[in-house]
Image (cartoon, rainbow, N blue to C red):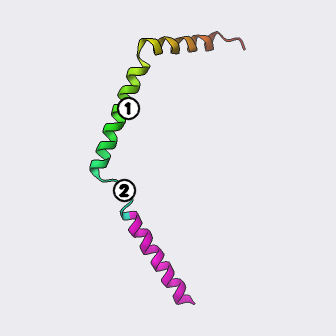
């Protein structure tokens, strides 16, 4: 029985090691992920700093500061 358990444990460890080797991204995938994140950040920055959104955010802050407690 001990040998059977030991064999199963070895097989499980080998499968986990094989899965771990294929789990990561390669350098080109990291680069594409960074480019996509930067592009999204630029779009978000443009939206937040636009005149209409900025005015609405200022109104929200002003209402929050003027609220009675």
SS majority, magenta: helix
The N terminus sits in image quarter:
bottom right
Count of number-bearing discs: 2
Mark identifier at residue 24: 2
Q: Residue at x 36, y 64 (%)?
A: 21
Q: Quadrant of the C terminus?
A: top right
Question: Which numbered disc, 1 or 2, marks the residue closer to the eye?
Answer: 1
Classify mark 1: residues with Cα within 10 Å, few (<14), some (14-19) or many (20+): few
Task: Give the percent coordinates (x, y) of residue 55.
Answer: 49, 11
In this view, which residue lies farthest toward the right?
Answer: 69
- Residue 19 magenta: yes
SS class, disc 2: loop
Q: Is 65 or 5 nearer to us in this picture?
A: 5
Mark 2 crowd level (few <14, some 14–19, many ≥20, 10 Å Cα) = few
Q: Is residue 49 above or below residue 41?
A: above
Q: Residue at x 46, y 12 (%)?
A: 52
Q: Secondary structure at mark 1?
A: helix
Residue 44 in the image: state x and y as whole percent: 41, 26
Q: Give the percent coordinates (x, y) of residue 51.
A: 42, 11
Residue tagged by mark 1? 40
Res 68 → quadrant: top right
Compared across the picture, whether 22 is left or right of 6 comes to left
**Which range is magenta?**
1-20
Residue at 41% across / 69% down in the picture? 17
Q: Where 42 sits versus 58, above or below?
A: below
State left or right for residue 11 relative to residue 25: right
């Amino acid at each position: 029985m001990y040998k059977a358990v030991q064999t199963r444990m070895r097989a499980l460890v080998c499968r986990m090691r094989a899965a771990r080797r294929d789990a990561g991204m390669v350098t080109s995938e990291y680069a594409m992920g960074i480019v996509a994140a930067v592009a999204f950040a630029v779009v978000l920055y443009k939206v937040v700093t636009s005149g209409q959104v900025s005015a609405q955010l200022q109104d929200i802050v002003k209402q929050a500061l003027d609220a009675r407690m």
